[in-house]
Amino acid sequence: MAAKLKLATTSLAGCFGCHMSFLDIDERIMQLVELVEFDRSPLTDIKNCSPCDIGLIEGGVCNADNVHVLREFRNNCRILVAVGACAINGGLPAMRNSIPLEDCLRESYVNCIGIENPQIPNDPELPLLLNQVHPIHEVVRIDYSLPGCPPSADVFWKFLTDLIEGHEPSLDYDLVYYD
Ligand code: SF4
């Protein structure tokens, strides 16, 4: 039997909706786990990415930790995939790009109604926010993109089964949408 492909996944500035849509493959996940082994992922307890065949990235890049994780995935994954609108073009979170970061933070932590002891969090444990939200291709090289917010379960299934069977992945027209 051929060795299983290794698959890692992560969520950067994402909402976990892309992961939920992935899980919408429902009972097909039983077929999938016969063919792939999950590495670092919100679905496992593995803390660091080891060398993998495929890395699925949900979410854009909004803070220093996102940059670190994205580079870890690029360094370890033979095929790196931008999953969903946020990873591809920043998505809805990139709407903050038209507002200065300082104004966003003040509105959330200082001016917001009902806040006690207003202050912008500054614990060094917290990852610093970037001034803007970026699509992941602005930080590392990307091999494929799966469009949609989120991509449907059938998109994940078609893409992964194409790769597992050794085909160049292709999505039928009715699987390609951006909303
Ligand atoms: S693309 Fe949509 S579903 Fe996926 S992380 Fe972004 S907002 Fe969530």
Image (cartoon, helix red, strand yellow):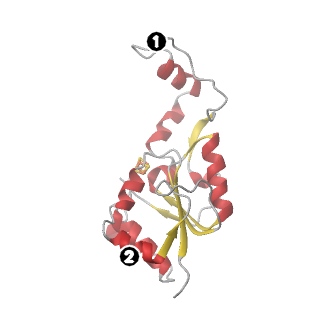
Residue at which label 2 appears: 31
Please state the horizontal and vertical placement of residue 40, each as a whole percent of the image: 56, 59
Q: Is residue 36 above or below residue 167?
A: above
Q: Which residue lies furthest to the bottom in this view?
A: 1
Q: What residue is at 48 percent from the left and 20 percent from the top?
A: 107
Query: Is 57 left, or right, of 152 in this rendering?
Result: right
Please state the horizontal and vertical placement of residue 88, each as a whole percent of the image: 51, 54
Please state the horizontal and vertical placement of residue 134, each as a whole percent of the image: 57, 45
Q: What residue is at 55 percent from the left and 16 percent from the top?
A: 119
Asked if residue 172 can be seen in this view, the reply is: no
Other-residue count near label 2 (Cα within 10 Å), few / some / many at <14 / 14–19 / ≥20: few
- Under mark 1, the amino acid is Glu
- Under mark 2, the amino acid is Gln
Q: What residue is at 62 percent from the left and 51 percent from the top?
A: 69
Q: In which quarter of the image is residue 30?
A: bottom left
Q: Residue furthest front?
A: 45
Query: Is 35 left, or right, of 40 in this rendering?
Result: left
Q: Is residue 161 above or below residue 15?
A: below
Q: Which of 167 and 75 is in front in this view?
A: 75
Kind of element beneath mark 2: helix
Instruction: Give the number of the disc on residue 13.
Output: none
Kind of element beneath mark 1: loop
Q: Could you tell me how far apart the alpha carbons at marks 1 and 2 are, in whole angstroms?
A: 51 Å
Q: Quadrant of residue 22?
A: bottom left
Mark 1 touches mark 2? (CB < 8 Å): no
Q: In this view, does 30 lie above or below 67?
A: below
Mark 2 residue's CB less than 8 Å from ligand 1: no
Residue at which label 1 appears: 116
Please state the horizontal and vertical placement of residue 160, each as a whole percent of the image: 45, 72
Asked if residue 118 can be seen in this view, the reply is: yes
Query: Is 1 left, or right, of 69 in this rendering?
Result: left
